[in-house]
Image: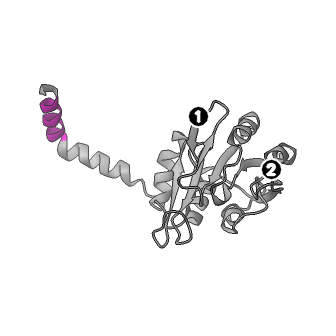
Amino acid sequence: MTTSCTDALEMAAILINIQPGDEVIMPSYTFVSTPNAFVLRGAKIIFADSKKDNPNMDEDSIEALITPKTKAIVPVHYAGVACNMDIIMDIANRHNLFVIEDAAQAIESYYLNKDGIKKPLGSIGHLAAFSFHETKNIISGEGGMLAINDESFSERAEIIWEKGTNRSAFFFEDLLINTDGLILAVHSYLLKL
């Protein structure tokens, strides 16, 4: 959980190590938080044109925008309308790029992939950002969520979320030091069941 979708996008930019001069491809039609999360780290935003039938990025225009400086593609599933994630993930995989889904408005929205499998939006790219703002599908007044779909980001995401402190290592080690006997007793009990 994050305080907003904006914070989730900013965490994603940190997680993929955006540096000054890196390029990030995203749709030209999006809320200002989407590009700002990357601009704050020095990225240059490369805007992709929208599709003819909706404001999502035209997946067929992405490849022509890629340069040696491109680091990520940020599809925005505007109003819960899915981008073609098969095409986006294929492009990203071929060019070794990260995909960060802006799923702010995509809670309870799905993508039907090329194999006929229905996948929740925000579960396909490496990372995804969701919003619980009062104008979204599920609200909490404010709030957001960063979804980690690539486990290699999990530990670092928790440290960033904890403002640079690796609290889980501290508490886990403390738990092992102080409760070895209890853990062994519970384990032994469970083995008897």
| Prevailing SS of the magenta stretch | helix
Residue found at the far right of this picture: 64
**Tag 1–tag 2 contact (CB < 8 Å):** no
Residue 94 placement (x, y as % from top left): 75, 34
Q: Which mark is residue 49?
A: none
Q: Is residue 80 above or below residue 143?
A: above
Query: Which residue is at a point 51% across and 65% down the rendered structure image?
Result: 132
Query: Which residue is at a point 64% across and 30% down the rendered structure image?
Result: 115
Q: Residues within 10 Å of mark 2 (few under 14, many from 20)?
A: many
As shown in the figure, which amino acid type bears the numbered disc 1? Ile
Viewer-proximal residue, 123 or 146? 123
Q: Is residue 192 above or below residue 132?
A: above
Kindly identify which residue carries mark 1. 117
Q: What residue range appears in magenta?
A: 180-190
Tag nearer the camera, 1 or 2: 1
Kindly report the distance in space between the C-alpha atoms of the residues bearing marks 1 and 2.
22 Å
Viewed as shown, does residue 141 lie left or right of 54? Answer: left
| 187 part of magenta stretch | yes
Which quadrant of the rendered structure holds the C terminus? top left
Viewer-proximal residue, 59 or 126? 59
Q: Earlier along the polypeptide chain: callout 1 or callout 2?
A: 2
As shown in the figure, which amino acid type bears the numbered disc 2? Asp
| 54 part of magenta stretch | no
Residue 188 placement (x, y as % from top left): 14, 30
Residue 67 visible, this orientation: no
Residue 153 placement (x, y as % from top left): 53, 45
Q: Which mark is residue 58?
A: 2
Element assignment for label 2:
loop
Residue 31 visible, this orientation: yes
Element assignment for label 1:
loop
Viewer-proximal residue, 88 or 190? 88
Viewed as shown, does residue 181 lie left or right of 130? Answer: left
